[in-house]
Image (cartoon, rainbow, N blue to C red):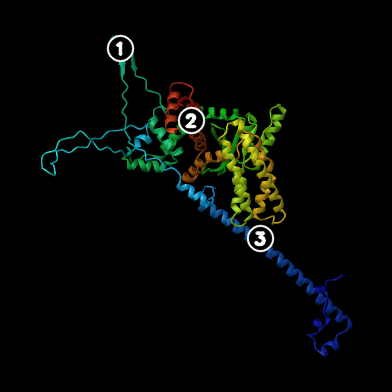
Amino acid sequence: MANEEDKIDIFQVLKPLTQEQLKTLSKEDLVQLLLGEQSLRLQFQTFCNEGKAIEEELKEKKLLIEQLYVILKSRFFGKSSERRKIQKTEQQKGDKKNRPRKKKHQKPSERYPDLPVVERDLSLESFPKCSQCESEMTDSGMVESSEFLTVTPIKFTIIEQNRHKYRCPKCHADLKTTPAPPRICSGSAYSDEMILDVGLSKYCDLIPIQRYVSMAERQGVPGLPPQSLIQLTHQLADFLNPVYLKIRDDILKSELLHADETPHRMLEGGRGKKSWYLWGFLNHQSSYFEIHNTRSGDVAENLLTQSNCTKLVSDVYSGYGKAVREANKKRAIDLKPLIQSYYCNAHARRKFTDVEANYLEATQFIDVYRKIYRLEEIAKKRPEHRILRVRKYMTPPFEQMKTMATELKNTISSKSGLAKATNYFLDNFTELTRFVTDAKAPIDNNSQERRLRNPVIGRKTWYGTHSLRGAQTNAVLFTLVESCKLCGVNPREYFPKVVEALHAKKTPPTPAQFAAQTG
């Protein structure tokens, strides 16, 4: 049965015609006129429906663009931390007044006990006169002491090395020269100390080589060739490669690994590819990097197949899923334990944080995640055998978020940012919550992301790499530097000791071993 809107009003159709025109119309003409009017109405209705559909689609696209704008604006101009301000109650504000006062400001010698202290005595050339009786004053033996921190700017020095020669005074048939001490690059115009300073300035302090050259010029050494200094970093990486391989062995022995990757721009010499990737793998004491011209999961699969890893912490990138699946196929044949994936909860929380400005419902998920992370902070302070006692209280909040996401899923547009966040959480719920029952597993992959921070900043600073050798130098030196930072070791103390050990033909320590030796 046709709708009321689809019925034709004959009087409205025939109204524009005059009586004379109506008399001239035959029965067939009237039928054609009425059918034509109906067809026009149907076409108009279809056009209106299509217009409404296009309008709805445009509204959705506009909303997605606005969400994307908010996210990009937050990433470029917002705070880097994901911590949120918590509104304090009046009671909490009052408790702040009753807190004990902070300790007195420490002297520099107390704050930095390992630094040398240089005493400086200040006295007058001639004794002053008393302001009362004008008698000449004498030194009382008392002093007024104060301390301040100072710095000696970097100083470049040329060393002229004279190796003595020895001859036989009797037969004069032999001549011997004092052997040259071992160096990173024998015959180089730069000392080991210079090579280490250049390498650490770039890969630890993230100072570009050209800026290092400018700094040296201000210190009275103009005209340092940048290409020669870049070559020094390659020679340093080649020299320290044994330590790099030891760190890789340590990674392969670990049962739990973190993994992440970041783009690395190859300016030339990249076999036709400009977009390379720096892959990072981490355990509790070593940070290891590899450079490859692909983001394929084959890179992670190759390492996982060789390793003892049974737990991989990563983001929800399909490459890691493929790597785990393929590695497990080979492990099953060799009767090795299979690898389980643990996904990063910081990524799941970030999905809700990105859309919080447009959807109030996202705030509920963020608040629940805040409770979970508070419990994790408490768990970290407990011994390993008591961590699960705290983490068992995380199960109800996770189930609460699962229920919220399931109920919310069918009430919002599937193309909205909130739908993507809830789907991300629901689709990966098992891997996101697997850590709750595993005391050794972390809640997120933030430790690996922190290790990638300096390579990312360095990439932005010096724009990219000019050769395959330069890319490998990045992987080697960032591996050593980031492993030092992970173990709490000062790279400028560690690198000279490693160079010294290699010169003495001794087994060089990894940063973790060096930290254990120095206590």
Q: In the picture provided, is 451 more to the left or to the right than 343?
A: left
Q: Which of marks 2 and 1 is nearer the N terminus?
A: 1
Dots 2, 1 in contact, CB < 8 A:
no
Residue position marked by numbered label 3 in the rendering: 60
**Mark 3 residue type:** Glu
Q: Which picture quadrant has residue 153?
A: top left
The answer to whether residue 465 shows anywhere in this view is no
User: Of the residues tagged 2 and 3, which is closer to the observer?
Assistant: 3
Q: Is mark 3 on a helix, strand or loop?
A: helix
Residue appearing at x 64%, y 37% in the figure: 298
Crowd rating for badge 1 (residues with CA inside 10 Å; few <14, some 14–19, many 20+): few
Residue labelled with disc 1: 168
| Above or below for 371 versus 12 | above
Image position, residue 401 (x, y; %): 67, 47
Splitting the image into 4 quarters, where does residue 279 fall?
top right
Give percent across and percent down for residue 290. 56, 35
Q: Quadrant of the N terminus?
A: bottom right
Identity of the residue furthest to the top in this view: 170
Q: Amino acid under label 1?
A: Cys
Q: What kind of residue is marked 2?
A: Asp
Q: How crowded is mark 2: few (under 14 residues within 10 Å), some or many (20 or more)?
A: some
**Residue at the spot of label 2:** 238
Q: In which quarter of the image is residue 274?
A: top right
Residue nearer the viewer, 124 or 259: 124
